[in-house]
Amino acid sequence: MDTIEHALTDPKTALDPYSLYPLLHAHDDIYWSEAWQCWMVSKYDRVLDVLHQPNLFSNEDRVTTLLNALPPKQRSEFKILQQHFGTGMVHSDPPKHTRLRKLATHAFTPRMVKKLTPRIESVVNDAIDKALETGTFELVADLAYPLPATIIAEMLGAPREDQDMFKQWSASIGALGGQGTANIETFRMVQHNIHSMREYLRGLLRQRRANPQDDLLTMFIQAEENGDMLDEDEVLSICVTLLSAGHETTTSLISSGILALIRNPDQMQLLLDDPNLINSAIEEFLRYDPPLQRTWRRISEDTEYAGKLLKQNQLLTVWLGGANYDPDRFDNPTQLDITRKQNNHVGLGYGVHYCLGGPLARLEGAIAINLIIQRLPNLRLATDDVTWKVQGLFRGLEALHLGFDI
């Protein structure tokens, strides 16, 4: 257990968590971390079980639980934070979550997502054209970040010149999560960015009410299910989630997927020979190196679980990456295999909170990765310096400099 605690407090583990997972797998099904002040599950079956019981392992009041550890005077400073994390799909359980998801799903039907294919191809091809002209390609800055940021901004109806603000705002929003402790400076940073993003979106909502457009904001305003509609706070919460979590997922999927192919040239060749393998490859990338390594839940009542006494309002970290590397569920989990069968990974979550934007992330990733490897011959790393970053629950590449033949 000391070894696990050491790994959890080692900054290197946040950047490369895959050495942690065998330690957790070798332990009990559920583990209490003194360092993080929360419970942990990492085995595949336990992860699914936890995510399948929102009544016991709740998404509601997780941030409130963290804030309650502060002195009352400091706690009163974070009313905006409490209000934001008290609304929206991500911060609710059924039946409230069920209602919100039904209304939000109107914007993410298969028809709506498929309609984006030509625009996604255009953005990707433009970035590759520039790379071929200049002979340089930094995948994250040149394509993996701009692509999902451009698409989601256009879907929402936000001006293109505002996209850099989204990156600044969203970079910190995932900083709260998983651990039973958080410092006050983190709370202040997250609250500031959430407030800025919500006020920006509130202005766009006023414009759409006066002048409806063919975009997501208008669709959310007009979304109706059996006479029920979203209120403004609910729309804002959904949009903040889409702008922050939505593009982080796709950015990491594209960049880490390309890195995995370069480091596994046999798998790269398989995909070059048969581009139709891309859908299977995307699922393997989401298993092999998921953008969202972990999520978290609040224990809603005292209960005995897996032989341990869990207390109300304790927090529980759910290691999605650990579940994807469970040797009891996946053969040779450390091996990249783009032809892997029955790949029921949890890279985009599981249960009622399964990623709403998953189909869009898959489409963007599939188009981008296939076009990159097909159009840039002899794709390789331009430098051995590969830098990872961690933003709360998310893990991805800071930059990926690529070389290729011209």
Image: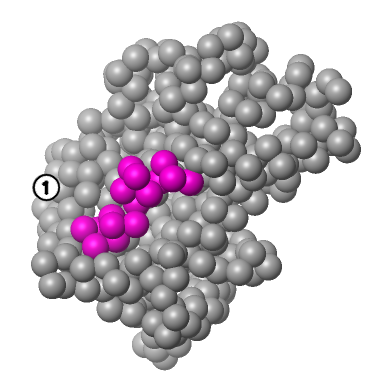
Q: Which residue is mark 1?
A: 304
Picture colour scheme: one colour
User: Dominant secondary structure of the magenta stretch?
Assistant: helix
Assess whether residue 109 is covered by the magenta stretch. yes
Which x, y percent locates residue 10?
57, 44
Image quadrant holding the N terminus, namely: top left
Q: Residue at x 76, y 19 (%)?
A: 377
Q: Residue at x 35, y 18 (%)?
A: 330
Which x, y percent locates residue 156?
48, 64
Task: Please give the range of residues in magenta.
Answer: 101-116
Location of residue 13 by image quarter: top right
274 or 75, which is in the foreground?
274
Which x, y percent locates residue 363?
47, 37
Location of residue 180 by image quarter: bottom left
116 or 262, which is in the foreground?
116
Q: Residue at x 86, y 23 (%)?
A: 406
SS at circle 1:
strand
Which x, y percent locates residue 322?
39, 33
Q: Is residue 251 left or right of residue 361?
A: right
Q: Is residue 353 above or below residue 376?
A: below
Location of residue 270 by image quarter: top right
Q: Is residue 209 above or below residue 220?
A: below
